[in-house]
Image (cartoon, rainbow, N blue to C red):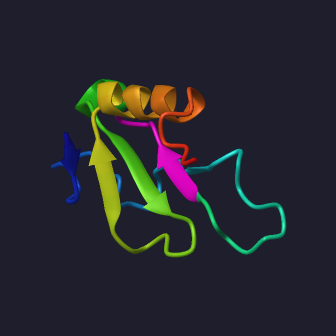
Amino acid sequence: MARTQDPSGTGLLSSGAAWVKSSYSDASGNGDCIEVCTDFATTHDTIGIRDSKDPHGPRLHVTPDAWSAFLTATTTGEFRTA
């Protein structure tokens, strides 16, 4: 389940949330990557995802189970095209 608004009380929109840039980030520095916040995975059942080029823009919030399924699908090649 994905939510586009900040879940009540999580603080994902605050400056104190710890956002981590993807390890697959483009090393040339052009910013083609995402950032993830897992600070509230246990307490509020949400993982935050945002575009590193627009850190104050919209954020996607998913459940830890949905994030895990996404990571599994990407590492197994489910999203690859021919």
In the figure, is residue 25 to the left or right of 49? right
Residue 28's x, y, as percent?
84, 69
Quarter in which the N terminus is drawn: top left
Q: Nearer the viewer, residue 77 or 57?
A: 77
Residue drawn at 67 percent across, 70 percent down: 31
- How many marks the image carries: the answer is 0
Q: Looking at the image, can residue 11 be seen?
A: no
Instruction: Report the residue that reaches farthest toward the right.
Output: 28
Residue 26's x, y, as percent?
75, 61
Residue 75 location, quadrant:
top right
In the figure, is residue 23 to the left or right of 79? right
In the figure, is residue 77 to the left or right of 47? right
Residue drawn at 31 percent across, 31 percent down: 66
Residue 47's x, y, as percent?
37, 40
Residue drawn at 56 percent across, 33 percent down: 77
Q: Determine if the magenta segment contains residue 75.
A: no
Instruction: Report the residue that reaches farthest toward the left.
Output: 8
Residue 71's x, y, as percent?
49, 32
Q: Looking at the image, can residue 75 be seen?
A: yes
Segment colored magenta:
34-40
Q: Nearer the viewer, residue 71 or 55?
A: 71
